[in-house]
Image (tube, grey):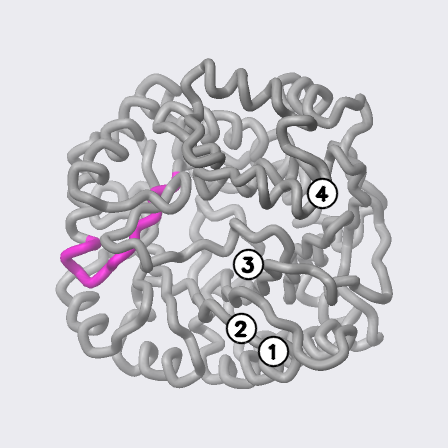
Amino acid sequence: MSFKTTLTRTWLTRSTKPFLFTKEYDEQLSFSDLDSLGLYVHIPFCERICNFCPYCKMPYSKEVCDRYIDALIKEIHKVGSMHQGKKEVSSLYFGGGTPALATDRLGEIIGAISEHFTITEGIGLELHPTNVNPDTLRKLKAAGVTKISIGIQSFGEKYQKILGRCAVDPESLKDALNEVLFETVSMDFIFALPDQTFEDIRSDIDKAFESGANHVAIYPFIDFTFTKSPVKAMPKREKRALLDKVTDYCSEKGYPRNSIWTFASKEEAVYSSMTRENFLGFGCSATTLLRDSFKINTFSVEEYCKRIDEDKLPTSLTIRFTLRQRMVYFLFWTAYSTKVDPRRFEEFFGAPLKRMYGFEFALAKMCGFITEEGGVYKMTPKGAFYYHYYENFYTLAYIDKMWGIMRKEAFPDKIIL
């Protein structure tokens, strides 16, 4: 597994130099001149910890949550004040954890952000199904949230039990979502679970759109080594067949695909916190991507709050990209949207894409992974599957290792990937 990712990294970066993350942080973050800047805020608290979830989270305590949010607001002001005036950003997303547990203080957080940033494309927030009730939704909307993503995972009783999730009533969802309207209502599902069939996933997709969603995200199950999930990953051939059927079904229904895993009932329904060329992350485990560096905040809530109290940034690890490393990162996450525009690549790096990676894109076209339309590369269904296939290796070789270490150490000396 690591051999494949190492070989790919060596080829694409034209270097044997690994990705080196070191225990350092900058006093200043240079983001004033960055276009297409996004914001992300992490709220790590959950009422109940799901055994399959790899993200940074901890059991909810009002006292700890309030202390954390106090620190979070300080971090936002500290970073925001590094730019003179207000910086225009494309979007703001809240993830977790369960951000709705902080609903009563969401207005404060968004207010702090609004002092330093102007958001042009709306505010998104992740929700647990139990949070989808008129009272909570009204509070979220009043705070400025325009998009929500509900972590259903599956409407099927069998898979709810496998994942350790509670039952979800589609009619209750529908009633609440009809009462309080949002620009985008996305519902998340997991595919490639044991014995899962296309009919199971089709049923989930249909129920989602019938229950008030205008966008669905269908993510593959990934078996992280540090989670306690007993679920085993589905074999490659079965997974490919399943994803192809899902893709064909959504195409037949007229649901446009706006990223590798997402389909919408209308073009304007968009929910993705991932496809940003640059972003600032606030909160524990949040990441920041700048022009030549990538930073990860500590995973420890306690150490995060201590760092902020010391008037320091909570950065745990930083990588200083080589030019080729930054190009690979740019292309990998841009491709998540299923499109790569060479003009944007050249604007960002000052070098033509065909000069830097012409051979690789020609090979991808020859293999049927992409097509070229109007000068823009577009991923085929075959390409989307193999993107997923490689992402699985990347996740287990890189992210699994990094998150596994950072869950145990607040500030590791270094990590080599």
What is the residue that sits farthest to the front in this orientation?
374
Identify whether 166 is placed above or below 86. Answer: above
Alpha carbon separation for disc pair 3 and 2: 27 Å
Q: Secondary structure at mark 4?
A: helix
Identify whether 276 is placed above or below 351. Answer: below
Alpha carbon separation for disc pair 1 and 2: 9 Å
Tell which of 307 and 276 is nearer to you. Answer: 276
Q: Which residues are magenta?
A: 208-219
Tag 1 residue: 113
Residues tagged 1 and 2 counted as in contact (Cβ below 8 A): yes
Tag 2 residue: 119
Residue in the picture at 33% in, 43% down: 257
Front position among marks 1 and 4: 4
Alpha carbon separation for disc pair 3 and 1: 22 Å
Tell me the amino acid under the disc marked 2: Ile
Residue in the picture at 46% in, 56% down: 49
16 drawn magenta: no
Where's the C terminus, which quadrant? top right
Residue in the picture at 22% in, 71% down: 177
Front position among marks 4 and 2: 4
Q: Viewed as shown, does residue 288 lie left or right of 54? A: right
Q: Secondary structure at mark 2?
A: strand
Tell which of 284 and 143 is nearer to you. Answer: 143
Q: Secondary structure at mark 1?
A: helix
Alpha carbon separation for disc pair 4 and 3: 36 Å
Q: Earlier in the sequence, mark 3 or mark 2?
A: 3
Q: Position of residue 116 (x, y in %)?
A: 66, 79
